[in-house]
Amino acid sequence: MTRHTITNRAAPLIHTPRVPALPPAREWTLSNGLRVVAVEVEQAPILAVEMIWRAGRPYEAQRLVAGTTNALLTEGSKNYRAAELERYFEQYGTALQTPEDMDTANLSVHTILRHAPRLLPVMTEVIAQPSFAPREFKRYLKRSRQQLREDLQDPDTFAYRLLSEAAFGPDNPYGYGGDREDYDALTLEQVRDHYRKYYGAANATLRVVGKLNSEVENLLETTFGQLPAGQPAPAPHYRIPEAAPRLLQHHRPRAQQTMIRRGRRGFRITDPDYPGLCVLETILGGYYGSRLMRNIREEKGYTYGIDTDLDIYRFDGTFGISADVANENVAEVRREILTEMDKLRQDLVPADELDMVRAYLIGGLVMDLDGPLAVSSRYRSAIIKGYDATEHLRRLDETIRNISAEEVRDLAQRYLRPEQDYEVIVGGAIL
């Protein structure tokens, strides 16, 4: 008989890749004062442009007017009706897009370089001369009311609305969800007024990705450089919500599952603690090997998925936990969430676990810089949220590599405070 000796093998070393420096973007100003932030694409003849205005919810005078104004941009211009605009861009294999963002208004198009001279003049006509036709306004309101009805029937969307309103307050730009009465109160004159105040070139940044040569620069000047300048928007007065943390439950008797959502506001990407919070959030529930996943999904089988997130806007943000569980497991899951938060407040994270999280986060940063489109997305986030992209990446890299277990515990003691959380329970369980 052959005897095999079993020896203990050391765990494989965790290799942490190096994060490259953020490639610099080219910046210049067009003749009307429009700031341009451009990332070069050398290999492919493409061009993507996006106008980003400081014209989102924090700037609005009437609930929902910011999103309505942005959505109506593509619903007709001086020379094109909505359907004609859509057909015009479709013939070149693209479309005008209005990406949704809480803090900004946005209009973008992606195309190949040879089509740009035909598309950018029409895009800038849409910006400079939107029709804001009464018929399209009424159609938009009708579609929005229908979407609202559907959203209120969707448990996930409904739970998100409840938690946002609880954490930020119902009158906060990040807190309100909008209801039928808000749409009924909107007028076309409010939309036009919001447009006049905020859609000038001096209140915007043009993000560009693609071939950068003299022809492209001249095209940008003869199109976007001729837009009305307007005035820069003053910084809005952001009021800090004062609502006390509480538990909200919405019982749905026929639901087989229950959604647990909890979190708190008070986070900005420019805060000194933000890079460390990224590490803490990942340890708690930010990746497949996190504490919450191992305990509640892998060991106890209470849920298919549970996770955490840092949801950051320009003036505020939330640290949240979410899970969808069977009704009979709600009490156990809520208890285990608190248990894992308490462990991070009391105990030091083992070195091997912290090293695994370091490698995971650094690997994600490296992937986020893979190619000019990804690099441009980094600059886009910085434009919208108001921070320096290069310095932010340096802070993240430095903190992830060097944060100690003691520093993680200190962050947990300051930020994982259940008594400061808002919690929403939506589904079939009864507490």
Image: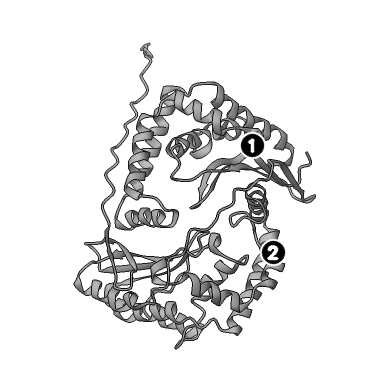
Q: Is residue 98 left or right of residue 116?
A: right
Q: Residue at x 57, y 74 (%)?
A: 191
Residue indicated by mark 1: 420
Which residue is more in the foreground, 261 or 243? 243
The image shows residue 20, relative to residue 28, as above or below, that is above
Q: Residues within 10 Å of mark 1 (few under 14, many from 20)?
A: some
* Mark 2 to mark 1 CA distance (whole Å): 27 Å
Which residue is more in the foreground, 186 or 251? 186
- Please identify the residue farthest to the bottom as the structure is shown: 79
* Label drawn at residue 179: 2
Residue 30 screen position, x and y as percent: 29, 70
Q: Residues within 10 Å of mark 2 (few under 14, many from 20)?
A: some
What amino acid type should be assigned to the residue bearing mark 1?
Gln
Q: Is residue 3 left or right of residue 303?
A: left
Residue 20 screen position, x and y as percent: 27, 43
| SS state under label 2 | loop
Q: Is residue 354 left or right of residue 336?
A: left
Residue 221 quadrant: bottom left
* Label drawn at residue 411: none
Q: Residue at x 27, y 57 (%)?
A: 25
Residue 120 screen position, x and y as percent: 34, 77
**Count of numbered tags:** 2
Q: Residue at x 65, y 54 (%)?
A: 161
Q: Is residue 9 left or right of residue 184?
A: left
Q: Quadrant of the C terminus?
A: top right
Residue 58 screen position, x and y as percent: 54, 59
What amino acid type should be assigned to the residue bearing mark 2?
Asp
Let me know if residue 314 appears in the view. yes
| SS state under label 1 | helix
Q: Are marks 2 and 1 in contact (CB under 8 Å)?
A: no
**Which is more N-terminal, label 1 or label 2?**
2
